Every structure is written in structure tokens, then in C-alpha cells.
Image (cartoon, rainbow, N blue to C red):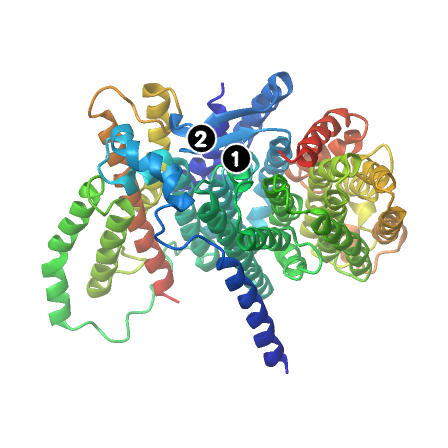
Amino acid sequence: MRRLLTALALAIVGAVMLAGLAGLPRPGDPAAPVHTHVAAHIVAHGVEDTGSRNLVTAVLLAYRAYDTFGEVVVIFAALAAVMVVLAPAAAPPPGKTAPPPSPAPAVAPSPVVGFVIRLLAPFIAAFAALVLWHGEALPGGGFQAGVILGALLVLLSVVMGRGLEQPLVPAAAARWLQAAGPLAFAAAMLIGLAGAGAVLGLPAEPAWGRHAVLLLLELGIGLGGAAIILGLYLQMRGH
Amino acid sequence: MEHLLPLAAALPLVAAALLPAVAWRRPDAAWGWAVAVGAGLLGIVGLLLRRLLQDGPFSYAVGGWAPPWGIELRFDALSAFSLGIALVGVAVLVFSGRYAQAAVPPQRRAWYYSLLLVNLGGLVGFACAADLFNLFVCMELVSVSSYALVAAGGGRIAALAAFKYLVAGAVSSLLVLFAVGILHALTGSLNMADVALRLADVEARGPVLLALGALTAGFMVKAALFPLHLWLPDAHASAPSPVSAVLSALVVKLGVLGLARVLPLFAGLDWLVLAPLHEGLAWLGAIAIVAGALAALLQEDLKLMLAYSTVSNIGYIVLGLGLATPLAMTGGLVHVFYHALIKATLFLAAGAIIHQAGFRTLRDLRGVGRAMPWTGVALSLGVLAIVGLPPTAGFLGKWYLLLGALEAGRPGFAVALLAGALLIFVYYLRILNAFYFRAPLREQILAVREAPLSMLLPVMALALLCLLGGLFGSGPVALAALAAARLAGGG
């Protein structure tokens, strides 16, 4: 009975939502407001305004950089949330500062897998760097590069058996790297204030200034994202 | 000077990310860092408020990108709630120093303060947002940190409550995002003023109605408006007490502020009549006042009682918005601010008592008022204020609401309002009776000592604000009246 009611309620809500959506402009309609108002302005002026040939980056890191700053902090908050919920609740016993070692994986990864991953590691890292560097011109950027780099760090941690007690990135450095995203935005805020007269503005002088700011943001987002992914993995490994 | 507007939210957010790194070698630095950031936030908000009072509302184009191309921030009468955020934030951060030592495991403490700062930054950003997507991002900052903070103290009940909160909150966030997407598809813009302008030319009625419905439902869940309040009591009662204070005083107000921000977007449509929506909100508000108060009456657990009282008080605020007369909306909005101060006082005082005594039900806590005289006084002041006795802070909102209900020619709502106040009076009498006039049931209560100064000071300061709030209420009332006029004027 209860299931029937739930299904009924869902069907009604779904029908109302679909009916409402039916009135939206057709996807891909060139005359739709999404294509004629703000987007049209950005397509027309984005490259010139921001110096980035990738308009997605122009929106993400210039026009709507403040939102991206918020998103980066949301990603950091996700890490903080996992830490605050999963970090051991009991204090370590006196005399013992290190937490008990997390259990080793039940099945050791095969030496072939370990070898291949270590062999591929420099290439994956290079690819991450390329995605980051080219984010300004091609599809890509800090978020994507961060995920690639983070996945690499997780893979390496798995095949090398590195857990919380012996992480790939030393814990003190990891704390700073995890803050890299918000920190890069803080720097960009101050640079914008000094160079463009507005928080998060792109400096007009020198000519390479705005490229440098965009690259700094990409770098912060990428490194921070990778460090956070590794942190999430390490914290959840024991559970 | 005007650059302070984007920095108001950015300061706590960046400081939050840095905190675990700063506190890595010296865990004791976490508290000092957080309190310093809270004080900085209070200073910035004070400067912004001074500018608002001198020159009126002002905007900031982040990055120099003029709206609607870029993100606009706006500090207006509604954003003045930032003062409440900063005041409660500082009090909670100071209070957390001793409290977290006992209630939050050491390895979680830095992250706990970090999440509190994220929460405060998100709240300030939300109050100053003039862009729909920015509003959503700030809401997510607040929500994600709130879910985790509920579970920060550990324990199975808290984890379960946090999960329930997460599910309800995620659904409401998705509803809001869904509506923002529809509005963007209809208008091609995200800037609120621009959306309001362009929405007037939109011919398709279905999507507009859907967006309005999704926004209203989403923010109603965030505000825990009856009957969508089911996630609230457990989450607010099982969280660490300073977190309960933030959640009850500030985070539920997000839903109310959100409603007050987005409803005017639809006011310019000549085919859309908002009156039925207002009527529905007024009814839900009135029901929430009585139902929340009745539920609170039945609780034995001190914090659960306060949590249900929040459901009741959100009812007052929404009733004010629903009645939609200038006086009623003024009352509702001024109560947004003062309820924040009062509920923070109550939750922090209750937290201090539970922390010192180790009990949390009224039966077990009998006689504790005499063992902790100063905290008892603060709690009593908060109680008087929440009942709405003049000249305390709680009086103003209810008085204007009463006038507004009569002005609207709806004496029925005035009766609900008074009935709610009466019920509140009864259940707070229960608290005072248990704390002062009943013989202790537990002998440990006799040995309970007054809370340490770092807990007592923020509680007393907030209690003093509750007491004086009514006497010096002309400023907040004037700001609330301004915001109400803007709401009613549809711009």
C-alpha cells in the first residue's frame, strides 16, 4: 500500500514536472534566450575580454570566477566533511601518537599490475599537466587535470600499499595542498584588486598578466583537487 | 571600501581552507584562528552595515564584469542579516573553545572549526547574493558543511540524523537548482534583477509556474516549514550544541531569506497572481506556530524542545511573509534577525548546562539553575525573549506581526499567533520551573559548577542583546521595513 502511494505520488510529481518542462524553448533553438542574451555577449567578447581562447574557461575563471571559488570551497568542504565524520573518534592511547595502521588490502595487487601502473605513471602525470596547461585554449582545465592526477595518486597508493601511516604526500604538505584551490583564488582576488581595481578582476597590464592569473587558478584547482581526492581515498581506505 | 563586499564571504572561506594546515603542528591554534576570523568578519559586516545606513543599498560587480555578464553582489536591507550571522558566529566560535575539547574528538577538531567557518562564509555570501547561481553555490556551502557538522560529535544518533538531514537537504537543493535552470532557459540570464525584468516578457506559463513551485518547495524544506520540518528536530538536537545554535539561529533562515529573494522575481508577471501562494504560506505558518509549540510542549529533552521551538518560530516568520502586508512582513523579517540572537542564546546556554551537568532532560536537570546562576540568568533572559515579553528582542517581531494580521483583516491569524505565544510561555515555564523551583532529582546536580568564562561570556553577551534588542529595536525594524517595502513593491 505504502509503495503504491509512493509510486503514485512520484508519478504525479513527475507528470507535473514534465508538463512544466514542455513549455521550455526547444533544445538547440538558435532563437532561445539562452543563446541570445548573456551567452551571445560572452561568445562575442569572451576571447577579447579574458584572453582565453576556451570560452568555457572564460566563463569559469573570469566572468563567473566568484562562483568557481565557491565550488572549490565546496570540494574542500567535502573533504572536511569526510574527515570530521570518519577521523577516529577516540584519542590515540597515551604514549602512542601514530594511529593504528589501517588493514592491508586483502589481496595484494599482482606485480604485473604494479609494474604497468608505475610504468604509466609519468605519462599519466604528463597528460594531467597537458590538460591543465591547455585548459585555457582547449577543452580541459584544472578540474579535469586534478581528477587525472588524483586518480594517479590513488592508483599509486594502491599498488604501493601506502595508507594513512605512510602517505605518498607527507601529511603536513598535504594539508597545504588541499587548500591550494581556495588559496589560488585568494591570490587572484588580491592580484585583481591591485591590478584591475576589482576583486577577481584580470589585470590588463602586463600583457601576460591575465594568462598568468588564469594559469594560477588552474594550477590551484588542479593540485588542490588531486590532493583532496587522495585525502578522501586515504581516509576511507580503512573503512 | 566597496571591495569589502566580496571579501566578507571570501575571508571565512579561505581561512577555513587554511585552518587544517595552520593547525597541523599546533592543534591549539585552531580555536584562536577561527575566533580571529570571526572577529574579522564581524568588523567587515559592521563597515558594510555603516555604508548601507549612510548611502543605502550598494552593489559590487565581481571581477569588474558588469551584470548581467558577470556576478553581482548586493548589500541591501535583507543582507543586513549578515550582522546576525557575524554576531552569532563569533559567539559560537568563542563558545566552541571549551565545548569542543569535550565534545569533539581531537583529530576532528581542526576540521570542525574549518566547517564552521565554511558555514559562516556561505551564509554571508547567501545574504549578499544578487545572482541566482551564486545564491545556489552559497546555499551548497552552507548545506554541505551543516550536514557534516551535525555528525561532528560522533555517535550513532547524530550520524543517522545527519544522514536524514542530508537526504532532505539534497532534495531541496536539487529543486532549487532545477528552478534556476528553468529560469536560465527562459531568460538566458542569472542576475536576479535581470531575470525579473526578462521574465515579464516570457510567454510560456508552464515553466514559470514550475520554477516558482520548485523554488518555494525547495526553500520550504531548507526553512523546515511545517510539514517539511521532519528532518529538523533530530538534526538540531543531536548536533554539538554550538552547531545546534548555528543551525537553528542561522541556517534555517536560509530558506526564509531565499524565499524573500526569489518571490519578487515573479511579481512583475501580470498574468501570475501570487495571492494564493501567500495565502498558503500564511496558513502553513500559522499551523507551524501551533504545531511546533505543541510538539515542544511534549518534549522532555531540553535540546529537542528548543528544536521544536524553531519549527514554531519559523512559522511566525513565514506567517509574516504570507500575510504580505508591510507591517506583517516587517514583523517577520525583524524576527529573522532577533530569533537568530535568541535561539543562539538558548542553545548555547543549554549547551553550557548540558556540558557542565552531563544530563539533557528536564527531569535530570532539576535544580540546575541554582548551581549555575549566571548561565541560568542568560537562559531565563532568552526564555523571556522568545516568549515575546516586552521589552525583550522577541517582542518586536510578534508585535508587528499582530498589527499586520489585524491590518490584513485576518484576526484568525492573530489568534493563532497569540495561542502560539501562550503555548511557548507554558513550555518555557516548564524549563524555568524545573531549573529553579524543583528539588534536584540527581544528586550530581548539587555539585555542578558554573560554566567556564569562555563559555559564559558569549552566552551572556547574546543574552544582553536579547534583553536590549527590544529597547534599541528601531534600527532593525527600520531595515526590516525597508526590506518589506521592497518585497511588497515587487522589485
Q: CA distance from mark 2 to mark 1?
A: 10 Å
Q: Which residue is mark 1?
A: B130
Q: At x 40% / y 55%, what residue is drawn?
A: A26
Q: Is residue B48 above or below residue B136?
A: above
Q: At x 55% / y 50%, what residue is drawn?
A: B208
Depth order, front residue of A179/A58: A58
Tag 2 and tag 1, C-beta contact below 8 Å: yes
Amino acid type assigned to the residue bearing label 1 in the image? Ala
Res B67 label: 2
How far from the left and from the top, in percent, is residue B70? 41, 33
Q: Is residue A115 visible?
A: yes
Depth order, front residue of B227/B43: B227
Looking at the image, is mark 2 or mark 1 nearer the viewer? 2
Amino acid type assigned to the residue bearing label 2 in the image? Pro
The quadrant of the image that shows the C terminus of chain B is top right
How far from the left and from the top, in percent, is residue B159? 55, 62
Q: Are marks 2 and 1 on the same chain?
A: yes
The chain ID associated with circle 2 is B
